[in-house]
Amino acid sequence: MRDEMKRGRSQVLWRYTPGALFRYNESGGWSTTTEIMQKDSAPLSGALLHAVRAALERWNAIGPTAYPDPALQPAKYVVGEPHYVIYDLWPLVFTCRACGRVHYYGDLATLNAKNARLGCTACKGSDQLRQIPYGYVHECGRIDTLFVPRCTIDSRHPVELVNKGGFQESFWRCQTCRKRLGGGSRAGLGLRSCECGRKRLKRGVPLEDSRTFYSQNITLVEVQPSVLEKWHGHPRFGDLLLGAALRIAPYQKDHLATLATRKPGTDELSPELAATRELLVKGGMSAERAESIVRQGAKAGGADAWAAYDAALAPFRGQTAFVDWSASQRTMEYVFVRDESTVGAIGLDQLAAEARAADDPITAERYDREARLGRDLGLAKLSVVQALPVLLGAIGYTRYFSSPTDAADADAGGARVELRPFPSKSKQIPIFVARNTTEALLYEMDPWRLAAFLEVNTKTKVPHEATASEVALRAWLLQQGQRLVHRGESHLVPESWEIEEGLNAEEGSALLFGVVHTISHILKATAHRYVGIDADSLAEYLFPAHGAGLLYVSAMVEFTLGGIDSVFCANLAQWLGSARDYAGRCSFDPVCSHDGGACHACLYPKFGCAHFNRTVSRAFLFGGEARGFSRRIEGFWMPAIAAATEALRKRAT
C-alpha cells in the first residue's frame, strides 16, 4: 500500500515528517511516512543556518555519526517546502476480527503478494484483519513491531492477542492450549532489547501514544527581504539596531526604511525636508531662498541623523561593544517586529490615542486602565502584532522523550535522547520549512523593574550612571545579559554539553531569562484558561536580552486568525488580571513550590516552548526556591522589588 496524501505545510511539519506514525484520515489504518518530496530546494544559509546550529547544540547532536556541523558543512543540508508525502502501511502485525488469530508479515511486498485483501487464513473471512495497535520505541529513535511468541508445546498452534487496553496489561495466548505466552505478568506483550548497543529495553507503547514520534521544529521571525536588502553591507546597520534597542532619542521607526540610503557625514536632506523645499518652491519662493531656509532648519534641527546617532550612542559604546550588533539576529527580529510598518504592531497607547481622536473617552480610559494593569505586572508596553511572518522548520525527530531534559528527569538511568535526522536519498539532510503570517502578542518588560530585580537578587549595585536615563539603564541591562545577546538563553542548571563548552550557570543573565520566560508561560496558560485561546495553539518567541517576548498563534491550528487581536482590543483586562491569580498557585502545591515552583500542572506546557521548559519557576514572580539558585529569590511581583524599582526611579529624577 503506497499512496500520496496531501496535507497543509505546517501540519506536515508537525505530524507527517518522515518517521511519523499516524492513522490514515484519522480513522483508517496505521501508517508511517517514508519520504517527503521537497520543492523550491535551496542551500542552508543565513539566519536559518544559525538557528539550526543552535538547535543541534541544545540536543548535543553535532558529531561524526549524527549531524554535520552546519557552520562548517552547510552543503550537507538541503532546505525546501514539503511538496507531497509518501507513506506506507505499518505495522504489519494483524489480528482477525472474527476468530482472533494473529497474522504477521515481514514486509509490505510479502503482504501484497500473499494477502492483499487482508483475509484471515484460519476462518477464511475476507477483509477481517486489523492492525495490532502496539509497538516498541526507544529513545535512540528506533521503532519496531511486536514480536509474536510461539506456543512452547506446539509451534503450529494459533496465537491470539488478549487486548486489555494497555501494553503491560495485554498478553499473548495460545488458542489451542489456552495458555499465556511470553514472560510473566510484568512482561505484558514482551520484552525486547534495543539494537543500539546500550543494553536497554525498548519501550512498549500504544500506537496512539504521542511518545511514538516527536517532530522537532524550530521557529524564526522572518525579516522581510526588502528590509534586509536595503541594509545589506551597510556600515551603520549595527548602530541603527543598537539605537533602536536602546530607544535613543534620534531613532525613529521610519529609519528602518529611510535611513539606509542616507550616508553619514553628507549634506543630503531627509525625504521630509526635501518635500518641504519643494512645497516652498511651489508656493512662489525662489529655489535658492527655499534651499537656504531648509538648510538652516536642517542645521538647527540636527538633520544629519548619523551624527545624532553618534552623539546619543557615544556614552554607551564601551558597555555595548561586546557584540557586532549588525550580526545579532534576535535584536534584528525584535526591532523588526516592534517597528516595521508591514508587521502592524499596535500598542495600547496607540489604541487609546485613536479612541480619543474618535471622541470615545470611555474606550480610551479602558485602554489606559489595561496599560496600568500591565505596568503593575512589570509589563511596560503591550502590543498586538497583526501580521507576524513566521518560518517553521523541521530538523529531525525523537521518540519517547520530546526534549533533551525529559529522559534525565524521568529515568534514573539517565538515558540519552537522540535527535535523528530525516532520511534522504541525495546524501543531504533535508530540512522542511513552511512560511506563514500569523498574529501575536508582544510584551515588553519594565527595564527599571528588571534592574531592581537583579540588584536585589544578585547584590549587584546598579551604578549611578546607569540610572541617568532609561537609555543608560537599557545599556546596563544589555551588559548584564551578554549571554542572552550571544545565545538567546541562559539557565541556572546547565546541561552537560553546556558545561563541556564552558557555559556554567551565570546568575544575572539566568535570572533575566527566567523572569521573561516565566511571564511568557503565565500569559500562555491564562490565555487558555480565561480567554478561550487553547494553550496548544500558542507558541512563544523570546527576546530575553531586550526584556521582551512574543506569544503567537501557531500556524498548525486552523481558524484562530483574529483571536489575539479581538482579545487584545476587547478582553485584555481579564487576561492580565488572571495572570497573577493563576501564577500564585498550583494543584500540586506545596510539593511544586518546594521543588522548584514549576511542573506540568502549572507552567510546563506540552507544546510551544522552544526552550524545553528550562529556567521557568513561579519563584521568579512570587519568590521562593528555584532549581540551581542557592538563595531564596525575591519575586518580580513582590513589594520588595516594587520598592527597589521606585528607589531607582527616584535616583534618576
Image (tube, rainbow, N blue to C red):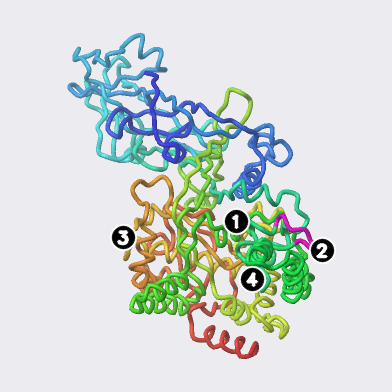
- Out of 272 and 47, give the one closest to the viewer: 272
- Reading the image, the residue beneath label 4 is 247
Q: CA distance from mark 4 to mark 3?
A: 35 Å
Residue at x-position 28% and y-position 22%? 102
Whether label 4 touches label 3, CB < 8 Å: no
Name the chief secondary structure element in magenta. Answer: loop
Q: Position of residue 443 (x, y in %)?
A: 50, 67
Q: Please state which of the two labelled residues, at mark 4 or mark 1, is closer to the viewer.
A: 4
- Reading the image, the residue beneath label 3 is 532
Residue 317 appears in the rendering = yes
Residue at x-position 26% and y-position 39%? 165
Quadrant where the image shows the N terminus: top left
Q: Earlier in the sequence, mark 4 or mark 3?
A: 4
Q: Please state which of the two labelled residues, at mark 2 or mark 1, is closer to the viewer.
A: 2
Q: Amino acid at mark 1?
A: Glu
Residue 160 in the image: above or below residue 436: above
Q: Please state which of the two labelled residues, at mark 3 or mark 2, is closer to the viewer.
A: 2
Q: Earlier in the sequence, mark 3 or mark 2?
A: 2
Circle 4 crowding by C-alpha within 10 Å: few under 14, some 14–19, many from 20? some
Circle 3 crowding by C-alpha within 10 Å: few under 14, some 14–19, many from 20? few
Q: Earlier in the sequence, mark 2 or mark 4?
A: 4
- Reading the image, the residue beneath label 1 is 333
- Reading the image, the residue beneath label 2 is 265
Q: Please state which of the two labelled residues, at mark 1 or mark 3, is closer to the viewer.
A: 1
Residue at x-position 68% and y-position 36%? 68
Q: CA distance from mark 2 to mark 1?
A: 28 Å
Secondary element under disc 3, as helix, strand or loop, is: loop
Q: Amino acid at mark 4?
A: Arg
Which range is magenta? 260-268
Secondary element under disc 4, as helix, strand or loop, is: loop
Q: Please state which of the two labelled residues, at mark 2 or mark 4, is closer to the viewer.
A: 2
Q: Please state which of the two labelled residues, at mark 4 or mark 3, is closer to the viewer.
A: 4
